[in-house]
Image (cartoon, rainbow, N blue to C red):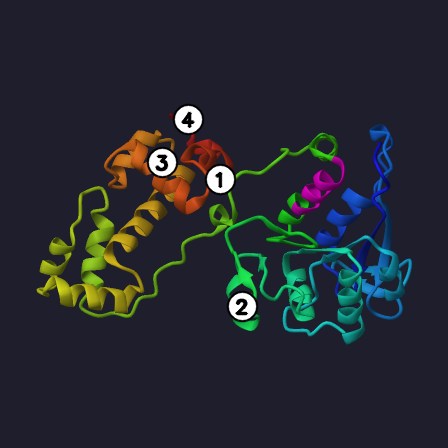
Amino acid sequence: MHSPPGIVAILAYEGLCTFEFGIAVEIFGLSRPELNIPWYRHQVVAVDDGPMHAMGGIRIIADAGLEMLDSARTIIVPGWRSRHDLPPAPLLEALRQAHGRGARLLSICSGVFVLAATGLLDGKRATTHWQFADELAHRFPKIEVDPNVLYVDAGQLITSAGSAAGIDACLHLVARDHGTHVANSVVRRLVMAPQRTGGQAQFIHTPVSTLPRNELTRVLQWAREHLQEPISICQMASRVAMSERTFLRRFRETTGLAPKAWLQQQRISRARDLLESTSQNIASISEACGFASVESFRVAFRTVVGVSPSTYRKRFGNPRAQTEQPH
C-alpha cells in the first residue's frame, strides 16, 4: 500500500523559467488515475508579490505564498531568474526551515544557486548546467561541484544539470517514492526513454583554441594535421628544437595540459566531428584519429564523453550523412 507522497511546492518568481517550471508541473501536478495510487498534491508558491511575469510573456498568479512551504514535503526550485540575483532573504529562510523539518529540496539547472545561497549544500556534492559549474564552484567553494552528471541525489537535496536534466531528477524522485515501475509508467506517458545514459560531457563542445601565438603554435597545428599517426613527445620537441624537458614545460604553459592529454583531447574532438558529419564506420574513425585499436578508441571515447561512439552518433549524427549503418 503506497502512502501519500504529500505536497510538492513549485516555486514561481518574477522572470520565471517556464520550461523548468513546466517540467515540475507535468510530473508532479498532472493527475495520474491510471496508476491507482495516491499521487502528489501540488501547489504553486509565489516568491514575489502580485502577478509575476514569466519568460515568453506569461503572467503567473500563484496558489499561495511562502507560508505554504511549511506544509510541503517536496520543494522544487525551477531555475532562477539570474545567477547574480541574490534570492530574497524570506525565501532562503523558508527553505532552511523546510529542510530542517525534513522536506526534500530539488533544483533544476540554475535553481542550484538558490539552494547554494541557503548554505544547505555546503560540504555536499551538487551539479548544475555545465556552463555554470565553474561559477558555482568559485562562488560557493564549500560545495563539491560535479559538472559531469545529469543530477545528484544527496538525500534531502537533489540538484540537476541543464534544464532537461530536471526531468531525470524529478523522475528519480518519483522512483524513490513509488518504485521504478511507477516512474517508468510516468516515462511512457512522457514518451521518453526510462533512463538517459551518460552525463553532461556528451553535450559540451570542445572550444576553438585561442592559444597565444608562440613557437609552439606551428607544432600544435602540425599535430592536429597528423592525428592519424603515432606522435611522440620527442617528435614534437624536435620540431621546435627544444629539449624534451623544456618542451614539456612550455607545452603545459601554452595549453594547460600535458602533451598526451592534449593529443587525447584533439583525437576525441576529431572523432566527434566525424561521428556527427560522416558515415564512416567506427573502425575507420578510430584509425583516422590515431587510436591503436578500435577497443582503445571505444574506451577513451566513453571515458571522455560518457557514452559509446555508436550512441553518440545516434544522438548527434547528421542522418543525411549516414548512408551506411555504423559498425
Residue 260 placement (x, y as % from top left)? 25, 53
Depth order, front residue of 61/297: 297
Depth order, front residue of 323/247: 247
Kind of residue indicated by mark 3? Arg
Q: Residue at x 23, y 64 (%)?
A: 251
Q: Badge 1, how many Cα within 10 Å: few under 14, some, many 20+? A: some
Q: Badge 4, how many Cα within 10 Å: few under 14, some, many 20+? A: few
Label 4 sits on residue: 323
Marks 2 & 1, CB-CB < 8 Å contact: no
Determine if residue 132 is in view: no
The Cα–Cα distance between marks 1 and 4, rounded to whole angstroms, is 15 Å
Front disc: 2 or 1:
2
The tag earlier along the polypeptide, 4 or 2, is 2
The stretch of residues the image draws in magenta is: 169-178
The Cα–Cα distance between marks 4 and 2, rounded to whole angstroms, is 42 Å
The Cα–Cα distance between marks 3 and 4, rounded to whole angstroms, is 22 Å
Label 1 sits on residue: 316
The tag earlier along the polypeptide, 3 or 4, is 3
Q: How many marks?
A: 4
